[in-house]
Image (cartoon, rainbow, N blue to C red):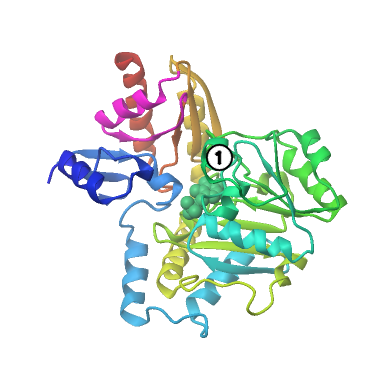
C-alpha cells in the first residue's frame, strides 16, 4: 500500500487528534527508516527522543526476545529480576544514597505520579513554567504551560501557577510555604528546545529548600543520555527531589519512571498508587539493555562531542538564526517562520525532523548516530535552505 492509501484509511479509522500523517513507516535499522513506498530516510527525530538506540538495535532485540520467551507479565503482586535491577540502576545513576523508583508507561504518568507524591507533603500548590510540556492527562496537562493545549479542557487542577521559564525572580515571587512542588524541564523540549540560564536550576533548588517544596525535574525528553548527561540537570550540580523519565528509557518500548530521592523516596505507602503494566518484565528488559549499551560504548561522551559539532556547524548555515540545546537535543531557529515547509522539504530530501514551532526545527536523533550521519544531516540541511526556500 502507498503512503496516500494509508493516510486515507487512517483518516477513516483513527481519531483526528494528530492530524493525518503523510508518511507511513514500515521498517528501520539504526537511524535509517523506510516508508510504505520504499523511500529511505535518515531519522533525526528518533520517535521524538524515544528511539535512543535507533531501530532494531541488537541489544534490545536480544534482551526483549529472551524475555518474551521466559516470563511476560507478573502483576504487582510479584517481583521479578528486571524491575529490581532497573530500579537499582536508575537509583545509582542519581548518585544519591536513597532513591526509589515507581514504574509506569509514559511521561504523563510519571508526572501524574509526581503530583500525587507531592500531595503527600500535605500541600497542594504547584509552580511550573510557561511554555512547558509535561503531558496530556488531566493532571499532567494542569502542569503543562501551553494555553492552546489546556484551554479546550478547562477546568484543570487548581492552584497551579505558570511563570516565565528561566526567570528566577518570577519563581521567587511564586514559591511559598504552600508550594508542594516545582516542576521544570532542564531544557524545554516541546517549546522549541529552550535552554535556561546556567544558574537557574541552582536558584530553584535554593528556593525549594527555603520553602520546603519538592523540586521535580521532568527529564522525560532530556533523560537517558540525550543531553550528554543521564538526566540533563547534572551540569548544575543540584540534587532534585524527584526525576521523571520516559521517552528514551525503554528504547522504543513504553516505559516511564518516577524516581524519588531522599525523604521523598518514602512518601508513598502501600495502596496509594499503582499501574498494571508499570515495570513490566519486557519493557524493563529493554531499558536494562539501553543503559548497558550506553555505558559500555561510552555513548555520553560521544553525544556531547557530536552536539557541539552540530551546534557550531549548523549555526554557520545562511537562513539559520540560532542553534540551541545540549548533546543530541537541538533546536534550530530559522530566520523565517517556515519550519513546517522546511520540515516537508527535508523529508523530500530524505531526512526526518519536526517543527517544534513555526520557526524552530527540533532534532533528537538516536544516540548511536554516526559522525558520517551527522555530516550528511548538516549537508542536507544546508542544501534545503540554500536551494529550497
Ligand atoms: C513527551 C513529554 C512528556 C509526556 O510524555 P508522554 O509519554 O507523551 O506522556 C512529558 N514531559 C516532557 C518533557 C516531554 O517531552
Point out the residue furthest to the front here: 155
* Rendered position, 55 above or below 173: below
The image shows residue 41 at horizontal and vertical percentages of 26, 38
Q: Mark 1: few, some, or many residues within 10 Å (few <14, many ≥20)?
A: few
The image shows residue 118 at horizontal and vertical percentages of 72, 61
> Residues in magenta?
337-359
User: 3 or 70, which lies in front?
Assistant: 3
Confirm whether residue 222 shows in the render: no
Label 1: element kind: helix
Q: As drawn, is 117 to the left or to the right of 257?
A: right
The residue singled out by tag 1 in the image is: 151
Query: Which residue sits at x=44%, y=15%?
Result: 319
The image shows residue 255 at horizontal and vertical percentages of 47, 62
Query: Which residue sits at x=53%, y=70%?
Result: 86
User: 351 or 214, which lies in front?
Assistant: 214
Number of labelled discs?
1
Which image quarter holds the C terminus? top left
Asked where in the image residue 8 lies, by quadrant, the reply is top left
Point out the residue furthest to the bottom here: 78
Query: Which residue sits at x=62%, y=34%?
Result: 195
Q: As drawn, is 233 to the left or to the right of 369?
A: right
Query: Which residue sits at x=43%, y=75%?
Result: 281
* Rendered position, 286 above or below 305: below
User: 81 or 166, which lies in front?
Assistant: 166
Confirm whether residue 76 shows in the render: yes
Q: As drawn, is 52 to the left or to the right of 108?
A: left
- Magenta region includes residue 208: no
- Magenta region includes residue 355: yes
Asked where in the image residue 265 lies, by quadrant, the reply is bottom right
Amino acid at each position: 500500500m502507498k503512503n496516500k492509501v494509508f493516510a486515507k484509511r487512517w483518516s477513516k479509522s483513527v481519531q483526528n487528534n494528530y492530524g493525518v500523517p503523510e508518511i507511513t513507516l514500515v521498517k528501520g535499522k539504526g537511524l535509517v527508516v523506510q516508508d510504505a513506498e520504499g523511500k529511505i530516510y535518515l531519522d533525526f527525530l528518533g520517535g521524538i527522543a524515544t528511539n535512543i538506540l535507533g531501530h532494531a538495535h541488537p541489544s534490545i532485540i536480544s534482551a526483549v526476545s529472551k524475555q518474551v520467551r521466559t516470563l511476560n507479565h507478573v502483576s504487582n503482586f510479584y517481583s521479578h529480576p528486571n524491575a529490581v535491577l532497573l530500579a537499582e540502576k536508575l537509583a545509582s545513576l542519581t548518585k544519591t544514597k536513597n532513591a526509589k523508583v515507581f514504574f509506569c508507561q509514559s511521561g504523563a504518568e510519571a508526572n501524574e505520579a509526581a503530583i500525587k507524591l507531592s500531595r503527600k507533603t500535605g500541600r497542594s500548590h504547584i509552580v511550573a513554567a510557561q511554555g512547558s510540556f509535561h503531558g496530556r492527562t488531566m493532571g499532567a496537562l494542569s502542569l503543562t504551560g501551553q494555553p492552546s493545549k489546556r484551554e479546550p479542557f478547562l477546568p484543570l487542577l487548581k492552584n497551579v501557577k505558570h511563570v516565565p521559564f528561566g526567570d528566577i525572580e518570577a519563581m521567587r515571587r511564586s514559591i511559598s510555604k504552600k508550594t508542594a512542588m516545582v516542576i521544570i524541564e532542564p531544557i524545554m523540549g516541546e517549546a522549541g528546545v529552550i535552554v535556561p540560564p546556567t544558574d537557574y536550576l541552582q536558584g530553584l533548588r535554593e528556593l525549594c529548600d527555603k520553602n520546603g517544596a519538592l523540586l521535580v525535574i521532568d527529564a522525560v525528553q532530556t533523560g537517558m543520555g540525550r543531553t550528554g548527561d543521564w538526566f540533563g540537570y547534572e551540569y548544575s550540580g543540584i540534587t532534585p527531589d524527584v526525576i521523571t523519565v520516559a521517552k528514551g528509557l525503554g528504547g522504543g518500548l513504553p516505559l516511564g519512571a518516577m524516581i524519588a530521592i531522599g525523604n521523598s523516596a518514602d512518601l508513598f505507602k502501600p495502596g496509594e498508587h499503582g499501574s498494571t503494566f508499570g515495570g513490566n518484565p519486557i519493557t524493563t528488559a529493554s531499558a536494562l539493555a539501553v543503559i548497558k549499551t550506553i555505558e559500555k560504548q561510552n555513548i555520553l561522551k560521544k553525544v556531547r562531542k557530536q552536539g557541539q559539532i552540530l551546534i557550531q556547524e549548523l549555526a554557520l548555515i545562511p537562513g539559520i538564526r540560532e542553534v540551541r540545546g545540549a548533546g543530541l537535543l537541538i533546536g534550530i531557529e530559522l530566520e523565517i517562520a517556515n519550519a513546517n515547509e522546511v520540515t516537508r522539504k527535508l523529508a523530500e530530501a530524505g531526512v526526518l525532523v519536526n517543527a517544534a514551532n513555526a520557526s524552530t526545527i527540533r532534532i533528537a536523533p538516536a544516540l548511536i548516530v554516526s559522525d558520517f550521519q551527522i555530516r550528511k544531516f548538516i549537508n542536507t540541511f544546508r542544501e534545503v535552505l540554500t536551494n529550497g526556500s
